[in-house]
Every structure is written in C-alpha cells, then in structure tokens.
Image (cartoon, rainbow, N blue to C red):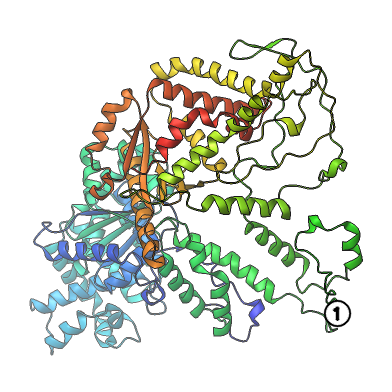
Amino acid sequence: MGPPASVPQGDGLNPFTDDVCAGPFGVEEQRSVPGLNVDILGQLTATIDERQTSTGRAGGQPLLLLTAPRAGYGKTHLLGRLAAAANGQVVLVPLAFRLEDQIGISAVAVRGLESMARADATREGWTKLREACAGVCAVLVRRLIENGTLPCANPEQALRVLSGNPVEVFDEKGSARLIGEWVRRFESQLRRPMTEQAMKRVPAIPAALESWVNAMLNHALDGGMSHVAVLRVLAADEANEGPVTWLRLLGLWRPVVLLVDHLDAYYRNPEAGLRIASLLLDMSEMDGVHVVLSLNQDVWQATFGHHLPSAMEDRLTASQMLLRGIGESEAATLLGLRLRHSAISAEQAREFTAFLDVKRYFLGRPLGSVSARTFLRHAAKQWDFFQQTLASPPPPATPIQHPPAPEEGRVLPLMTDAVPVSDVEETQEPAEPSIFDTQTAAQMKMMAEGLAEPKPALPQQNEAPLMPMTPRPAAINGNGKHLPAPDTVRDEAPAAENGAPPPQFSPSSAGAFENLREMLGKLRQPSVPHPPGEEKGTHSVAERLADVMSASAAPVAAKASSGLPAPSRAPSPSSLPPPPSFAGAPAPAAVPGPVQAAAPAAAPAIATATPNAERDALLGRYEALRLQMAAEAVSMPLDFTKLADLIRLAGKRFPLVRFSEHELPGMTGRFAMCWSLQGLEIVFGLANFADGSYWRTLAGFAAGRLAELNLDAQSTGVSAARLKITTFKTDREQQSWAILQHSTAFPPELTSHVDAIHLDTQNVASLYAMQRIIKESESGSLQATPAQVMSVLARELDFFWKRVTRAG
C-alpha cells in the first residue's frame, strides 16, 4: 500500500515495482482492472458452474486450458480473480510441480496441500488448508443431524449454521463457536460416526478414510503444523489411495478446482509434458474435480503441443482461452489504481499521469501486444525519473542575468552554420545556471535526442564517395569488359578550399537538416490528380518510390550526353554520380573539389569510362551473382530468409517507407515486418506455408492492425489506410499455398487483404543476387556501403518494388 502519508513525496516507495503475482490467493477484485480479460473470467466461471450443476459430467469441459503469449500477461492474477469471483463456492487448490517431483497423483496432493497450508485465510491464525478441513468436518456433522444419528434441540438452526462459514464454527472467537465447542467436547464420540458418513459418499479403504477424518478434525479444531505434517504423509501414501481420498473428501464440502501453474521449469521436456497431460486429463474425469491448466505459449509449443498424440492434444485444447494484452484505457485504469492505493498526493498523481502520457506510450503498438507487466515496468522506470526531477536542487537565489536584446538589424540567424565564428564569439553571454543536476540533464538530453527526426533513409550529402574496387592492372568487370586502372590516388580536398564545409560539419547539422525537411515536404505533396476509381495515396506512392529508385541513372545519362571530357586521374567526390534524389526535389549540390588539370585530348575513351568504372563494376558483380543464383532459384524452395533481409534493408533505406518490426505474440524471436506508406500498410508474411501456427498468429496480428487503422481513421476523420498481407510464392510453393488458402488460418474478413506475389526463377535469382551483394558490402568484402549498392542497383528490382507497393 506504500509508505505512510508523513513520508516526503520524494522519498516515497515506487508504486509500480510490484509487477509479479506470487499466487492466486489474496487477489482483490476492487484492486484489479475491471475490464481486463473479463470475457475469459466469465467463461471460466460459467464453465465450472455449468459442469457442477449438470448431472454427472455432461455439462462443461473437464479441463480448461488458459494460455498467454508470454510471461507477464496476468495468468496467475486471473486465477486469483477467479478465486475472488467464486466467493467461497469452490475449493481452490493451487498446484506447482517441482523438478524433483515424480510426476504423479501423489505429487498433486502433496503440492496442493502445501500451497493451501501457506495461504492465509480471512481470519488470523487460519489457513486455506485449515478452512477446508473445517468445512469437511462441518459437512459430516450436518449429515449426522440430517439423518437423525446426532440428536439436536434445534436442528434447523444447527443445519443453517453448519452450512455457513466453517471458520465461524471452529474458531474460538467465531459467531457460531458454541457448536464448535460442543464438537470439541464430544470429539471422541463423534469420530466414528463421522467416518461412517464419509464411507457412504467416498469410495476408499476404511482404515485410510478413518485416518483422514481424524487428521482433518484435529487440524480444524487446533490448527498447527504438526497436523499439517500428518496430512502430508497421508497425501503421499499412494498404496492406500491417499491422494484420491484427499480430493474426494474436499469434494464433500465444495467443488475442487485444481489450478496448475508455473510449468516453465519443464520447458523443452516433452516426456514430462506427456506425463503431466495424461495425469491432468485423468484427474479431470473425477466427480467434483475441475482442472485449469495455465501456461505460456512458448512452454505449450516446446513441451506439449505437437509432442502429444493428436487425441490427447484435442482434449487439452477443447476449451482453450488465450489472454490478450492491455489496451490504452486499461493501462490508464491500472495506472490510476496503483496511484490511488499508494501514499502520494492527488496533485502528484495528476502530475505523474501527465508525465507518463499513456496515450503516447501505446501509439503505434499493435493491439493486445503490451502485457500488464511490461507496462508496469515502464511506469516504474518513469516514476524513478519523475522522482529524480522532483529531488533536483532548486535554482540559485541570485537573479538570472538575461542577455540584452540584440540591436535592430543585428539579429542572430537560427542556422549556426551561416554565422561566422567571430560574430558568435562577440555575441556570446555567460551561460545561464542549470536547474537540473548532471545526471538528470544527461537523461533529458538523451530523451531529446531520441525525439529528433531520423536521418534520411537514402544517402544524401553525407554519403561517402563510392570507392573503386581493388585496383588491378586491366581489371575485368562482371560483363567481361576491361576497366582502366586509375593513374593515381585521388587527392583529398582541403577542408576550407572553395568554401567547402570544414571536416567537423555533418549533414545532421541545421542547414542540411532544413534541406532534408524541404525535400521531404515536396515529396509528400500529391503529384497528379487521382483518376476516378483509383484509391488515393497508393498508386502515386508506388510511382514516386519507383522514381526514387530509378533516379540514379539520370546523372549518368546527362554526363554521357554532355560530351564534356573528364579528368584523366581518378574522379573526385564531386565527379562521382550522385545518389538518387527525392522525387520532385532537386538533387543535392555536389561538394566542390580541387581544381584539376584538363584531360589530354588524345584519350577520350579513357576519360569517358573512368567516371562510371565503379558503377560498371557493381553492375558486373550483380550480373555475375544473378547467373550464379539462377541454379538455386530453379532447384531449391523459396528462401524467405533472404527475402526478409532484402525487405528489411529496403524498408530502412527508402525515404517513402516507414519500416517497423513487431514480435508475434507467443512466438519468441519471430517478427512481422511492416512497410507503412501513404494510404497503405504492408504486413509481410515470410514463412513456409505449412507452418499453420505462424500464419494464424500473423493473421491475428494483421486483424489487430486493421482494427487500429480503422479506429485511428474514425478519431482523425480521414479515410482509413489500406492494409494488405503480402507474401511470395513460386511454382514450387503453389500447392502448399492453395492448401493454406482453404484452411482456417485467414478469417473471412482478411481474405481480401492477402496478396500472394508470384515470382518466376529470373525474379528469384535477381532478388537473391541483390541480397548477396548487400551482404558482401556489409561484411567489407565489397568496397561499397549498402546504401551505395542500393543507390546503384535499386533500379534492377523495379519489378519487385512496384509489385509490392501496389494497392491491390
């Protein structure tokens, strides 16, 4: 509940550090988010009620499977809410196996009995185990009164009291303690009749049943760990059917619900998974016993799942419920609950709520992908930072001297790169004192840098000049043409010559940043009116994306048509072909280089070939790789890993694309890649079509994104962006794709959003060649950066980019 109110605000405990639910007992419904998984909670309670009220086992499922994408989604907390919703109508037996246990019914009885002995009841000195023992004894005494074996002056009142809370009967301070005192006084005469009543309803060995009744009566009257030890020994006695007798006796009082949780220690242990599944299915067939199996999807897939026989897997998943993450409104409710139950003022709670900004945290996150534990840990970190800002030293008492306003006509420009250093030094004033300490200032600076606009996706002025391949005399490129070796190494341009920027200048400075903004602004303007019937924002984007990728050829054509001679030595950075410019925006101006001597008139061929030598070498390498990959494209299945590498790099490099990756729920290490363009969002499906679990999970993710897009469109009043699931296939995958299409992987509402792009062998070879040459540039075996490779060779895959970005 947090520290007392007298503790200063800056020294208060973090109200969000408690993010792990240790067990199902003690969870309070009023301190839980009301709408979180309320549908699953209702389904759990309804199924148990239906099976309990039906004749035999006709109604309800015998075993309920509760799964979550991963840890932190609130499985144990939901089981605690189930216990609170039951309100004393069932006996909850939490069960957590240990690695040293021999998996069997005795382990179920022993571990369940121990967990109940550790759980406190509503009254001091009472545990859930003692309460259950008292309940069983109260039922047996009530049966003696009902059949007349035990005479009673007022049987109606005695039956009503014995049907209530057994703690009030057997506790020395309980409201019905008179009956409990009477049982304590005549316990020796009551033990035999109580055992006979139990024999009528519990099929067990008489001697073992008598031991159980005596031990439960002793624990109900006196409590104490010595009686718990006796019960534990009886529960471990499989020879006398002790475990089964224990569960059947509990069922005399209330229905028994076994809560099987914390099976993570059996990860990737299919043998243990088979034994646990067989044991729980057998126990679920017992009258009055319900089983709820709770585990994460990674444990289910690695330990159970396909490792079980199909009939057993079908029985386990007959009533499966999947937890989802919290949404924005639920997170806000959880935040308010934690703040209300902590010792902080209402004003500070309002300030932290605004500081945390729940809406911003959920912006762009897939629906249901945020677990409650993830959000609580984020809130805990933000709380620590919020407290540090409160504890920062106040500013000095001396008044701050503000610099005098500049005279008219002598206003400092915003762009510092246009101001001479001498002017800046003349106008500098003493720095103002900081109101933050050093650590806080560093953290705020890091946060501010994280909010800065990203660098341009395609290389601009900051791209280093394309270095030539390793020089060799009379080198041969991939097309079989001889390339002239450069005469000398190019000269480095002086930093200050011809007004060139100094070495410390980078395109991330203000001037280049403004140029980038201007080009992006022009890019986002609609180019031509949309034809009637064509969806707005999709075809034009595809055209502009193709223009960006094909623009690299324009400078070469202009150079060839000009007929100007080129210098004889290796080209300077300014003479290299510039990278592709943004569509509709001027290409960046070349950086001035040193003045070079004119080329001799007798060598026009060499002067023409030298500026394009590096480009020709890259094209030659690409053609050689494409021929090399043709055999793999014909003989091998489609390699989705290579396609994923290419899509990831292109998504990060193209300026028109906003690239993102999202981990699929319940599939650790597997991600869905997304391209977001103007009016279109593309979700890539890159896996074997026989992997049904992947495609079902991807379909669920896409459905969540589609709902988010529609919701955002309603809130902003604009038309919703189109969404499509894009995958790739060849003739080899055609049959498996047809099977997947006719399966239940894609819901009917998503079928129209699936776009399967067919690739022939030449297309596949081109894609493989591009992926390989990019890998070579990343590893350093190719003297060119991945950005330079993309700028030169992106046009070679025009067929691919245009098909991927097509709206329909």
Give the class, few, some or many, for how many residues have Cα within 10 Å of label 1's Cα (few <14, many ≥20). few
- Which quadrant of the rendered structure holds the C terminus? top left
145, 639: nearer the viewer: 639
Q: Quadrant of residue 731?
A: top left
Q: Residue at x 13, y 59 (%)?
A: 59
Residue 78, image x and y in percent? 35, 64
Res. 323 in view: yes
x, y (%) of residue 83? 32, 68
In the displayed structure, 194 sits above or below 688; it is: below
Write the residue at 57% across / 41% down: 653
- Report which quarter residue 579 is drawn in: top right
Rendered position, 223 above or below 567: below
In this rendering, position of residue 791 left or right of residue 229: right
Q: Secondary structure at mark 1?
A: loop
In the image, 686 versus 625, the foreground residue is 625
Residue at 10% x, 78% y: name it. Answer: 146
Q: Amino acid at mark 1?
A: Gln
Q: How many marks?
A: 1
Q: Foreground residue, 751 or 176?
A: 751
- Picture layout, residue 684 above or below residue 318: above
Name the residue beneath numbered marker 1: 401
Q: Is any atom of residue 103 visible in this view? A: no
Q: Residue at x 18, y 76 (%)?
A: 141
Give the quarter of the image for residue 562: top right
User: Residue 726 location in percent, x, y?
Assistant: 37, 40
Q: Indicate whether 540 appears above or below 208.
A: above
Query: Which of these two is toward me, 319 or 142?
Result: 319
| Residue 655, position as x, y percentages in the image | 55, 45
Task: Say whether residue 630 is left or right of residue 247.
Answer: right
